[in-house]
Image (cartoon, rainbow, N blue to C red):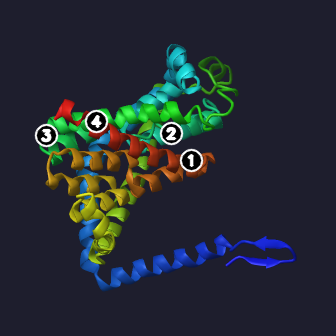
Amino acid sequence: MEKIASGTISKPDTKKMTNIIIPVLVLLFNIFILISPNKIISGAKQGIDLWLNTVFPSLFPFMVGVNILGGLGVINYLGRFLQPVMQPLFGVRGQAGFALAAGFICGCPIGAKTTCDMLQNGQLTKDEAQCLLCFVNNAGPIFILGAVGTGMFKSASAGYLLIAAHYIAAILNGLLLSKNGFNRKGGAGYVKNIISLRKTGEIKTFGQILSESVKDAMETILHIGGFLILFSVIIEMIVAANVFGAFSELFSGVLSLINFPPELLNALLTGIVEMTNGAKNLSPFGVNVQNLSACAAVISFGGFSIHAQTVSFLYKAELNVGKYFAAKVLHAIIAAALCYVLFPVFC
């Protein structure tokens, strides 16, 4: 409650509220572990299986490759060629194209990590990094086409539709948000280059670059795995507590009016928490415009599991988490709309 005293309005202390809510949630988490250890173990096993058999083999080689290219100074050379594209479209320097390519090819959260690394290395300004986060932290093509399209939906055409909606929406998101306050200075700032590195004696041998690249990639993949396993356990807890079912019951009247199945809402809510599990739960509903639009939204939003991984990088780089989150919500909305429009073309 707000209190009026001496002509001033004092707002509730949100920090104190957070200090109460978070310990309570953690306490409930630990109590659930004691009450239902079998469900916790089941959720953890699912997370480990997903990480070991899908995420690790698909992301680790790409991360090593991206790190090596960065160590060899390819970012600066690439910037010369991409400057005529990146500057007029997004208001960022050409080197930013490296983060864009990493995010499009490698998948989440590599786009965000590469952006933060480039900011900390002096290759981007803070405004440019904030701008890039609007559209570089995307799901990879191997995941969308292979794991989701062919693997889950048993349809390559569905995979191509999801790829088109996801990437076009990302570019539109970048074009829209880069012109509306996410990039204020348009690329001013100091940029390291290969010549200055040679002068200061900072150039490393290929052996050093390779060793550091593998080490950094391994640390990142373990970091991602930890969050994936944790959120798989959280999803198992939510399902056991029937939270999604209660939510569907609450809005059953609205769902019936728009002909939206409650089971589909449950799968969609799962995807908001963890993207891969959400897409998996959506796949049994088949290849139709409603289901694929929901899947496009889930993939483009990324899920809180991906956001938790990303936020850990953003805090180190001191970037605005709220702006990143708002951009991902907008990305999900645009992708769902595009999927709905493009469905007749692909399917």
Residue 131: x and y in percent read 57, 36
Question: Of the residues under marks 3 and 2, which one precedes in the sequence?
Answer: 2
Comparing 104 with 44, the one in front is: 104
Residue 139 shows up from this direction: no
- The residue that disc 2 covers is 134
Find disc 4 in the rendering and name its residue.
Answer: 341
- Separation of residues labelled 3 and 2 (CA atoms): 29 Å
Q: Is residue 144 visible?
A: yes
Give the residue type at disc 3.
Answer: Ser
Q: CA distance from mark 3 to mark 1?
A: 35 Å
- The answer to the question of whether label 3 and label 4 lie on touching residues, with beta carbons closer than 8 A, is no
Name the residue beneath numbered marker 1. 323
Task: Pick the quarter of the image with the C terminus.
Answer: top left
Dot 4, how many residues are within 10 Å of its Cα: few (below 14), some (14-19), or many (20+)? few
First in sequence, mark 3 or 1: give its number: 3
Of circles 3 and 4, the one toward us is 4
Nearer-the-camera pick, 272 or 288: 288
